[in-house]
Amino acid sequence: MSYPKGTLIRNTTSERINHWITAGCFVLLVLSGLSMFHPLFYWLSGLFGGGQWTRAVHPWIGVVLFLSYVGLFAQFWRDNLPKREDLDWIKAAPRVLANDEEHVPEVDKLNAGQKAVYWSMALLVPTLFVSGLMIWEVYFGAATSIETQRVATLVHSLAAVAAILVWIVHVYAAIWVRGSMRAMTQGWVTPGWAYRHHRKWLRRLAESGSAGPRPRG
């Protein structure tokens, strides 16, 4: 993989592929799930070949998402461990929203907002997976009672709404912070971007010698 000279590797190829598989599955699950959630969204089932096909394919996409997210969790958990600096960043969050990051406390590779998205999904994805299995009629219908399925359906729906809200925040933040999307599409950021948004991470790379000029190839 070739990166522009003088840039910093933010996300490896495997991390980016893992991320976009998870993201793609999530979008498909939202579309198919909404089509079954309320008649107002039933027209979305046409994207999957109709109501029966939507009902059949939705849980399988969920299985792929869960497996993909396990890989994503394994690759990013170390960078998402809570640190004392996260509280300082949260206190300064209004400055971040105002695009005045010059006086925001320095953070490492990920800030508290990014960690909140990560750990929220770390809770919601398994919840969606387990509750989804409990209402997967074809394979598990005989193993769960009607009462259990009703509770699982409610939990699944609430967790899905929460996951969608977290996803909206995640996408909005990625678009709001210029250069973040490129980090997940092409894998690299400029030293200036790192200095402004993740200064402690840049200092750590500089101390280890990883922030020097990067040749092509």
Image (cartoon, rainbow, N blue to C red):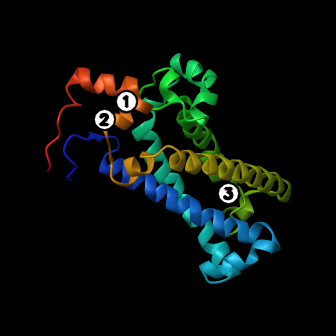
Query: Which residue has dot 2 on it?
Result: 191
Tell me how far mark 3 sits from mark 2, CA to CA: 43 Å
Q: Amino acid at mark 1?
A: Tyr
Instruction: Say whether marks 1 and 2 touch (CB < 8 Å).
Output: yes
Residue at which label 3 appears: 132
Query: What residue is rendered at 66% in x and 53% in y?
Result: 164
Q: Amino acid at mark 3?
A: Gly
For this rendering, which residue is in front, 136 or 7? 7
SS for callout 1: helix
Which residue occupies the extreme top position in the image? 84
> Circle 2 — which element?
helix
Give x and y (percent) for residue 156. 73, 53
Does 104 sit left or right of 154 as displayed?
left
Query: How far is disc 1 from disc 2 in space, using C-alphas?
Result: 6 Å
The first of marks 1 and 3 along the sequence is 3
Task: Kindly report which numbered mark, 1 or 3, lies closer to the viewer in this rendering.
Answer: 1
Residue 141 in picture, x, y percent from top left: 73, 64
Disc 3: CA contacts within 10 A as few (<14), some (14-19) or many (>=20): many
Visible in this render: residue 109? no
- Estimate the x, y position of residue 67 in percent, counting from the top left: 48, 53
Q: Which sits in the foreground, 38 or 1?
A: 1
Location of residue 94 (image quadrant): top right
In front of the other: 152 or 143: 152
Residue 17 image point, x, y percent: 37, 55
| Residues tagged 3 and 2 counted as in contact (Cβ below 8 A) | no
Which residue is painted at 65% across and 75% down in the image?
Answer: 54
Tell me: residue 30, above or below residue 74.
below
Would you name the residue on which mark 1 appears? 195
Q: Earlier in the sequence, mark 3 or mark 2?
A: 3
